[in-house]
Image: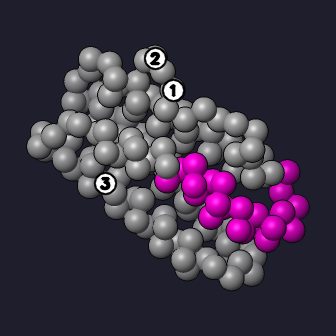
Amino acid sequence: MHGTLIRWRDDFSVGVAALDEQHKQIVDVVNVLYAIKTGNTGRKELYDVLMRLRIFTETHFRYEEVLFKYTNFHDRDAHRALHTAMIAETARTLGIVENAVDTDVSPLLVQLSHWWVDHITGADRKYIGYVTKLGLP
């Protein structure tokens, strides 16, 4: 790997093991994407990793949104809007790469690194108090 874009830190933990593991998986995929970007790989590999990121992201967001159903989290609609925007951006980038318009994912990498760190350490922390009441490990 040609470096790491996001290094997992203990302060990223939201205190719910399942969510932390999902967040770590997404960070790992972002880092694989970064390694591909900084290496010499083709459009197919880039597309495959972006698709993997999209699947992980959608799965994680569905998990969070199921948790919202079991809590009284007051800001669930705004949180869902954040999810929708990130999925749309990832899908847009997939389309660009798939159609060979551009394979420069640098703007997405910058956005992803900031978005995920901000989302984990900011937006997700807003609902953790509600989720921990469910008794998840």
Residues shaded magenta:
115-137
User: Given the image, on which type of amino acid does mark 1 rest?
Assistant: Thr
The crowding category of the residue bearing disc 2, from other C-alpha atoms within 10 Å (few below 14, some 14 to 19, many at least 20), is: few
Q: Position of residue 25 (x, y in %)?
A: 58, 38
- Residue at 57% x, 55% y is 118
Label 3 or label 2, whichever lies nearer to me, is 2
In this rendering, position of residue 113 left or right of residue 122: left
Which residue is disc 1 drawn over?
4
Which residue is disc 2 drawn over?
1
- Residue at 29% x, 39% y is 105
Q: Earlier in the sequence, mark 3 or mark 1?
A: 1
Looking at the rendered structure, which numbered label has been put on residue 91? 3
Q: Position of residue 49 (x, y in %)?
A: 37, 34
Gap between marks 3 and 2, in whole Å?
A: 25 Å
Q: Earlier in the sequence, mark 3 or mark 2?
A: 2
Q: Are marks 2 and 1 in contact (CB under 8 Å)?
A: yes
Report the predominant secondary structure element of the magenta stretch.
helix
